[in-house]
Amino acid sequence: MELNPQEDSPYSTCLPGVNSSSIKRELFEKEAVTKAVIIAAGNGSRLQGYQNHCPKPLLKVGGIPLIQRVIVAAKKNGVTDFVIVLGYQAARIRKRINAKKLGVRITWVRNLDWRKPNGVSLLKAEKYVNGRFFLFMADHVFDPKILKKLESVSLAKDSGLLC
């Protein structure tokens, strides 16, 4: 998969078979990404009736809460510093996730506007991150190997990558 920068957008997409080697841009130096933001603020409205009042990040898949799966997968790739944005049932989620036990550092950020789109939650985390970081949703399950591939993609200054 190659990076396909759009000329009129600071964002890029991964598209199979697209060669971006001829595009000259100011690129970030490749460095290990050790920080991540996890958005865990919503109430899981699409799951109403299936979650028994459990916040979606704490729903278990294979016996492990979704948010813990995200943390563990990211940690396997060297991410040790997390900013977790909470909203709905924040205290319950915070109580369930033990940073020390997981071997990571967590900065908890409260989003009282959690009913608004995810971008609002990301803005709440803005002052806690600088440089390169991964952005995760607390309820997305992914193969940890994808992070190494994403980390190696060259991006233009002030750009993002959506895969």
Image (cartoon, rainbow, N blue to C red):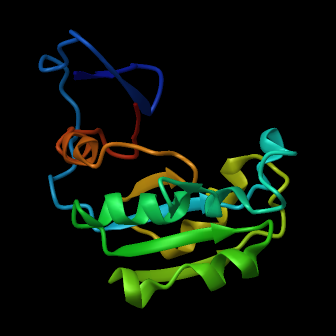
Q: Position of residue 18 (x, y in %)?
A: 23, 11
Drawn side of residue 3 relative to residue 70, left or right: left
Picture coordinates of residue 162, whole percent (x, y) = 43, 33
Question: Does the rendering let one see residue 104?
Answer: no
Q: Is residue 149 above or below residue 33?
A: above
Where, quadrant-wise, is the N terminus in this rendering? top left
Based on the displayed image, in which of its 4 quarters is residue 69 positioned?
bottom left
Task: Tell me which residue sits at (46%, 45%) in the image.
Answer: 141
Q: Which is nearer the eye, 88 or 125?
A: 88
From this view, report whether residue 16 is shown above or below residue 47.
Answer: above
Residue at the far bottom in the pictured view: 100
Q: State the image coordinates of residue 163 (x, y, percent, origin top left).
A: 40, 31
Q: Which residue is pictured at 39% across the width and 43% down the height? A: 142
Seen from the viewer's position, the closer of residues 157 and 67 is: 67
Residue at (19, 47) in percent of width and height: 148
* Residue 97, above or below 153: below
